[in-house]
Image (spheres, rainbow, N blue to C red):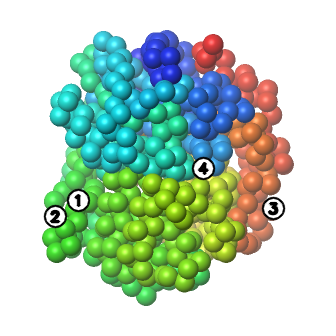
Amino acid sequence: MLHANGPLLTVDVGERTATETSIEDLLADTVGGRATATALAHERIPFDADPFGPENRAYLSTGPLQQSRMSFTGRMNMTGLSPLTDGLVSTNAGGYLSRNFVDTAISVLELTGKSDELLAVHVTDSGVEFEPVPELAGATVPETSDYMNEHHGLGPEHCIAIGPAGENLVRFASVMTFDSRAFGRGGLGAVLGSKNVKCVTFEGDAKATVEVDIPNSPTTDVHREAAQSDDLMRRQGTTGSTEFINDNFSLPTRYFEDYEFENADRIGGDAVEEKKDKKGACSACAYACKLPTRDEDRGVETEGPEFETVYSFGSLQGVGDIVDVMQANDLCDTLGMDTISAGVTVAAYLAGEDEFGNAELAREITERIAHREGIGDLLAEGVARCHDDLGVDDYTVKGMEFAAHDGRVLHGQGLSYAVANRGADHMYAGMLGLEYSGELDPEGTLGKAETLVTLENHNVFRDTGIICAFGGDYVTEDRLEALFDADYATLLDIGARTVERERHFNNRRGLDRDDDRLPYEIPDFENALTEYYDARGWNHDGTVADRAVVAAGSAVPSAD
């Protein structure tokens, strides 16, 4: 089976050491990306670790397809113990980092320990350097990239960085790359901040030492079809569905008070396309679905917003001006915050203050969150920890704020949010696509568990390969089999074992069925939960038997 090559590089930023460990057996078993990082995290992060403690570890990992030039492969994975959900979280980002990472000849970077001063870590094919950067304290993400470019000749495509939000331990701080691409959900930017790591750069010319033999036919076919596609997404990104969802399902509005937004057309796909000023892409991708946008009158230039930001800083806040949403998007990228969690948290504040529609106040509060100033210090904890003080309902699952796709209307998606190991994240399974299309009836939860399990397993492998979620129509099951030289059931099994590792880790931290909860009712929920556990082969209390996961971890090297 095709898999990534290269060692694990463990960087202890407290001890200023870098150690390479062979993980060949682990890669053969887990392929790369999310599955490999989750296996390492499960075995090497203590079950009782503090997310902000030196014992937490952050993993940046690549898959074998990052050594190809196939469209939809310009992505990387990050995994760690989340300060937002208190469980394992994986998140991935596009951009141009992956090929530079591969050129250092490693497959996984592991960051551990805690520095006593703010650091830049430079990873090359010949070693690791530690650079104290006290002058970058409080710097924005673009300011950090500019510094690296000026002093080291390494632009943002070589870099992961955090902004003020990460330094200030905002629980939903992002790790950014290429200035505008976010390892967004779960707060891994705050994990780097807790370690006093401002940025990590990657540079080398050693890819040939870890090359993998990738079949030519699927890669060229996918690339050609991506280049020739006339999908609406190539023009409007994910915002192209805004008005369809608003008119036919639900676009959560005014902190979930309403199900539709009267100004959806002013923040939807056409409005975004009007502001798009050029094409944008990720590394080696001919699909080019990114959204570089500009408004000259108000002096804003950003990349996006995508649909989730249109929801979180638009409809959910009662804001009906696309330029306001663009400004919020740019602010979150610059400060280093997940636009979904940040936007939902700001919407909760606006609800408590009866200030829906006040975009200027929303931007002020967003900035205060990043710096933990005044009310921002409370809001930086996220909705689950501050909703009582705000006098609003807790719209989270496992502490993670909801994505746009409304489980009150899409009941299978609601079930997906409840059971997802990382909480209310729409990318964990993606039941929403089947329910929006009508392939699966949005009503009801019973009988959907098997489909949900398959989607979760598939998405793990997508994040393991690593393949962009938007490549699903092109990187089909038969092409996955050809690319990885394995039958599809084997690939899904890698996904299943990864989901189980996540669940087991979270179980050991005290999470179980009681945490698979929603803040609203959907039909037959308790019975659907049991169906899901049965489909997974788990206990009805939402736990995994220790023996199954312990046996699966035998290929993981010890952290000692």
Mark identifier at residue 527: 3
Residue at image coords 41%, 61%: 367
Residue at image coords 39%, 76%: 359
The amino acid beneath tag 3 is Asn
Among numbered discs 4 and 1, the one appearing first in the sequence: 4
Residue at image coords 60%, 45%: 83
Q: Is residue 479 left or right of residue 549?
A: left
Residue on which disc 2 sits: 277
The amino acid beneath tag 1 is Pro
The amino acid beneath tag 4 is Leu
Q: CA distance from mark 3 to mark 2?
A: 50 Å
Q: Is residue 481 left or right of residue 520?
A: left
Residue on which disc 4 sits: 84
Residue at image coords 39%, 36%: 198
Q: Nearer the viewer, mark 3 or mark 2?
A: 2
Q: Considering the numbered disc 3 on the image, is that residue within a helix, a strand or a loop?
A: helix
Q: Is residue 515 above or below residue 96?
A: below
